[in-house]
């Protein structure tokens, strides 16, 4: 079954369970009225002013949106002091007007930029109805430039001090919100090892989840009780929009590139640009946008949700391991997203537990996605270790003579540059008449001679042996008896060739040039080019002396010229 089918199946179950009458509160439904900002309570209460009490009355067409609760709705709320409760959203001003049985009226006015009184649990705010001896017979509430009709749909009179979510629910939501801290800590640790962008996007997503969940559940009110309605509305929308943007970019960077097509990546990238645009338009303080800004806000997420479904399904079918984690993690979120879009577009009014269900879906997403990130981290770390090992092997191969297994000139120069070892002498040894070996016995026999020579030179001299090129070998000796060690190595070469290459009847000898250092010298202090040139000079002297011998000289490293002194 595809992700799309699963998401719509879960959405259908939630929709069937959540369908409710036109309002979620108990008691008779309020009537509404849309007016200009110049219409006060006296104007809208005048005879002949018609109020909308139909099922489709939830509109934001006017600059001022009115709610009217009659005596029956007030009586259904209970006896004693009453409050007006509603879901918090963005508005410029709220005015609560109460008309009593004796004809008197009282008003409570708050601006959207002022701190609102909130419930200790849940996302609702409240205004206390002024008390008089006569009972109230009508409560009228006016919202100026209201951002979301949800506030109208959830509004209700209720006994003072009641309402809000249960302590157990708030504890669970606090626990779910706290879970979002774990991915932040883990991703910081992962990012120190692997500089991958999807880790940064996942941290951004976790931060937005903490902020949005704290606001939409009312947890933020306990920490910052002075949040205004305007700040709440903007922060809630911005955190949610940035969170979806971060989720989109996380998905784009988390899925394996070889498991997604260019079209998939372009679709996700388009969603990343689409979201800020629609969020900005829906939140724009422009009057002609506001009446339908909430529907635009929710409708803007519909193509994003569909893109998630299509991209993840296609990546799963291509064998993406990351897509499997993302599909399992995001399926509840996507289902809740479709439900919220349907509710936000005004298709129905759902119960409160649908909002609370989103927090459970977020908690599941955080846990499963964190497991997916950890799995991807381990895979990428194994790939990185394998790549480093291969690079190291290639580097070793580049510094090693493939025939003899000795270091080549590059490896020898790197060894000297690294320093750390002290040497007493250096020798350049060349196999005598090696060209005739190749000419008389073939290159295969010549290779065997070179391998035997390398083995002989390695026998017990206690230093470094490198093949410089052709039949030339360079020795760095670290023993006090440098002359004796070099001579033993030269003779061991001839013995090993005679033992390992019996098809060559004539003995193979070697000549060498030995430079004995004035004092034990660190390898990093040696100038290899000068050292090689001097050893080569001694080698040619040995060749001209009849071969099969070693010519020795003493060596003192010349001081390297100082740039300033040379210029002077």
Image (cartoon, grey):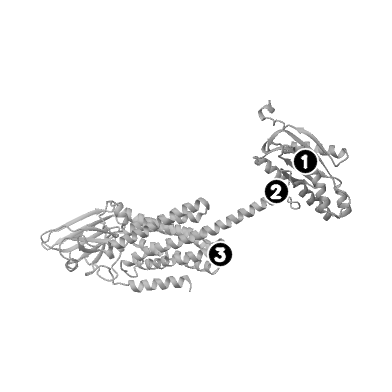
> From the viewer's perspective, is the residue at label 2 or at label 3 nearer?
2
Residue at numbered disc 2: 399
Q: Position of residue 225 (x, y in %)?
A: 28, 52
Whole-angstrom CA distance, mark 1 to mark 3, is: 61 Å
Q: Residues within 10 Å of mark 1 (few under 14, many from 20)?
A: many
Report x, y in % for residue 74.
Answer: 18, 66
Q: Quick one: SS at disc 3?
A: helix
Residue holding disc 3: 259
Instruction: Pick the residue in front: 310 or 353.
Output: 353
From the top left corner, tell me how far across and down residue 526 is, in percent. Answer: 70, 36
Question: Along the line of sight, which residue is nearer the eye, 421 or 112?
Answer: 421
Vertical order, 10 against 43 (above or below): below
Q: Earlier in the sequence, mark 2 or mark 1?
A: 2
- The residue that mark 1 highlights is 486
Q: Marks 1 and 3: CB-CB under 8 Å?
A: no
Disc 2: CA contacts within 10 A as few (<14), some (14-19) or many (>=20): many
Q: Which numbered tag is attached to residue 171?
A: none
Q: Residue at the location (67% across, 29% down)?
A: 562
Q: Is residue 560 left or right of residue 230?
A: right
| Mark nearer the N terminus (1 vs 3) | 3
Taking the image as shown, residue 492 lies to the left or right of residue 419, namely right
Say which quadrant the C terminus sits in: top right
Vertical side of 213 occupied by 306: above or below: below
Nearest to the eye among marks 1 and 3: give it. 1
The nearer-to-camera label among 2 and 1 is 1
Q: CA distance from mark 2 to mark 3?
A: 38 Å
Instruction: Measure the alpha-carbon separation of dots 2 and 1.
Output: 24 Å
Inspect this view and state whether residue 533 appears: no
| SS state under label 1 | helix
């Amino acid at each position: 079954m595809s992700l799309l089918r699963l998401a719509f199946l879960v959405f259908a179950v939630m929709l069937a369970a959540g369908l409710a009458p036109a309002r979620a509160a108990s008691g008779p439904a309020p009537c509404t009225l849309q007016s200009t900002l110049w219409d006060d309570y006296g104007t809208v209460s005048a005879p002949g002013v018609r109020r909308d009490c139909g099922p489709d009355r939830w509109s934001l067409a006017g600059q001022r949106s009115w709610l009217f609760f009659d005596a029956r709705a007030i009586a259904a709320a209970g006896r004693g002091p009453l409050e007006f409760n509603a879901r918090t959203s963005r508005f410029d001003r709220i005015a609560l007007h109460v008309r009593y049985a004796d004809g008197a009226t009282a008003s409570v006015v708050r601006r959207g930029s002022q701190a609102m009184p909130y419930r200790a649990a849940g996302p609702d705010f409240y205004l206390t109805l002024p008390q008089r001896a006569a009972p109230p017979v009508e409560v009228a509430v006016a919202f100026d430039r209201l951002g979301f009709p949800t506030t109208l749909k959830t509004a209700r009179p209720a006994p003072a001090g009641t309402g809000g979510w249960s302590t157990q629910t708030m504890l669970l939501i606090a626990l779910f919100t706290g879970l979002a801290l774990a991915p932040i800590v883990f991703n910081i640790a992962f990012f120190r090892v692997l500089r991958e962008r999807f880790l940064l996007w996942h941290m951004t997503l976790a931060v937005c989840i903490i902020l949005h969940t704290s606001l939409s559940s009312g947890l933020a009110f306990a920490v910052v009780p002075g949040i205004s309605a305007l700040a709440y509305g903007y922060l809630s929308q911005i955190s949610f929009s940035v969170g979806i943007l971060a989720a989109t970019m996380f998905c784009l960077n988390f899925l394996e590139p070889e498991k997604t097509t260019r079209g998939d990546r372009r679709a996700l990238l388009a969603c990343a640009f689409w979201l800020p645009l629609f969020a900005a338009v829906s939140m724009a303080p422009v009057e002609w946008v506001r009446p339908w800004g909430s529907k635009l806000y929710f409708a803007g997420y519909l193509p994003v949700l569909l893109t998630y479904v299509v991209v993840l399904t296609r990546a799963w079918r291509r064998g993406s391991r990351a897509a499997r984690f993302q599909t399992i993690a995001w399926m509840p979120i996507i289902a809740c997203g479709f439900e919220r879009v349907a509710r936000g577009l005004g298709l129905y009014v759902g119960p409160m537990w649908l909002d609370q269900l989103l927090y459970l879906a977020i908690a599941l997403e955080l846990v499963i996605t964190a497991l997916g990130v950890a799995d991807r981290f381990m895979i990428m770390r194994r790939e990185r270790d394998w790549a480093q090992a291969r690079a190291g092997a290639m580097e070793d191969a580049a510094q090693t003579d493939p025939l003899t297994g000795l270091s080549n000139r590059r490896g020898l120069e790197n060894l000297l540059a690294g320093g750390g070892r002290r040497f007493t002498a250096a020798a350049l040894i060349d196999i005598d008449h090696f060209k005739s070996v190749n000419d008389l016995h073939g290159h295969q026999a010549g290779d065997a001679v070179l391998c035997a020579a390398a083995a002989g030179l390695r026998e017990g001299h206690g230093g470094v042996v490198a093949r410089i090129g052709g039949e030339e070998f360079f020795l760095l000796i670290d023993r006090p008896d440098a002359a004796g060690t070099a001579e033993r190595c030269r003779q061991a070469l001839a013995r090993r060739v005679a033992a390992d290459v019996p098809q060559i009847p004539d003995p193979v000898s070697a000549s060498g040039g030995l430079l004995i250092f004035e004092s034990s010298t660190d390898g990093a202090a040696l100038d290899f080019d000068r050292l090689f040139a001097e050893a080569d000079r001694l080698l040619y002297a040995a060749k001209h002396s009849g071969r099969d011998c070693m010519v020795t000289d003493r060596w003192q490293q010349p001081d390297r010229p100082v740039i300033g002194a040379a210029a002077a």
